[in-house]
Image: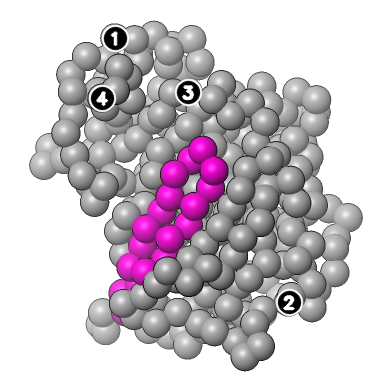
Amino acid sequence: MKLGTVDTPHGAIAVVERDGAFRRLESSVRELLRSGPEALAEAASRATEPVTFTDADLLPVIPDPGKILCVGRNYLEHVEELGNTVTKSPEIFVRTPTTLARPYGPVIHPKLSDRFDWEVELAVVIGRAGRHITPEDAYHHVAGYTIFNDFTARDYQRRTTQWTPGKNFDQTGPLGPYLVTSDEIPDPSGLDISLTIDGEQMQRSNTRMLIHSVPALIAFLSSFATLLPGDVIATGTPGGVGDGRDPKVFLRSGQVVVSTIEGLGELRNVVEDEVAG
């Protein structure tokens, strides 16, 4: 099942792909996930009203997640390119919903940053609430998967030992284009993941290279926080970021960044300078 959120003149609506067309759902994606997989399947079966839209109309697939939990340094190549070391426990930081951007919309280059970087990531969406989830039970709590790009202001990230400032500029985290439910991707540990800028490949890897697997991440995160339906876990980026290159390369206004994950589609975002004000 493929779920999305579409901007319309009358507000945001949720859609589901069924019988070769997208059809309107009666509640938001997050609300439907809260209702449980059986209720979601029932709502999808009742959806009959077709919805016509363009890629540009797509909003972040979950515009209002309760938590966006992000994982740093989770591919060995990325750890090494930035001169870091592998940690026993995952490196975790948090993003806020105001950082989200449309999957086919602009991402905003912060006017305060000269080192705006890219990070394509597999995102896990929680479908069943849980605390102290075991790795063996983790996939029962997953609604599905989508794509995230953790665009980062490296200069702000490194102002302190905490990464929050560099990761939380508005409209720097495209999420989507759709939520592909876990019945279509029962095992996310073998998906090709890549990123291009203006057609030039900058990142290419596979999710089998994750240091901390999806079940391990869910177990760790749920050890200290209750995971709720609609929460998003961004699992980390592979090597190839601009800050890890010699010489370093950072994004400029007008560049087109395409983030692709096998089975999930792509994000396509144009970099736009923040309007002074």
The answer to which of marks 1 and 3 sits earlier in the sequence is: 3
Circle 3 or circle 2, nearest the eye: 2
User: What's the magenta region?
Assistant: 256-273
Q: The residue under label 2 is which amino acid type?
A: Leu
Which image quadrant: the N terminus?
A: top left
Q: Closer to the camera: disc 4 or disc 2?
A: 4
Dot 2 alpha-carbon crowd within 10 angstroms: few under 14, some 14 to 19, many 20 or more: some
Query: In the rendered image, which residue does mark 3 sit on?
Result: 34
Q: CA distance from mark 4 to mark 1?
A: 14 Å
**Three-letter amino acid code of the residue under disc 1:** Arg
Q: Which residue is mark 4?
A: 21
Answer whether labels 1 and 3 touch (C-beta < 8 Å).
no
Q: Residues within 10 Å of mark 3 (few under 14, many from 20)?
A: some
Number of numbered markers? 4
Q: Which residue is mark 2?
A: 82
Rendered location of residue 16, percent (x, y): 33, 25
Secondary structure at badge 4 equals strand
Classed neighbour count for the residue bearing mark 4: other residues with Cα under 10 Å, few (<14), some (14–19), many (≥20): few
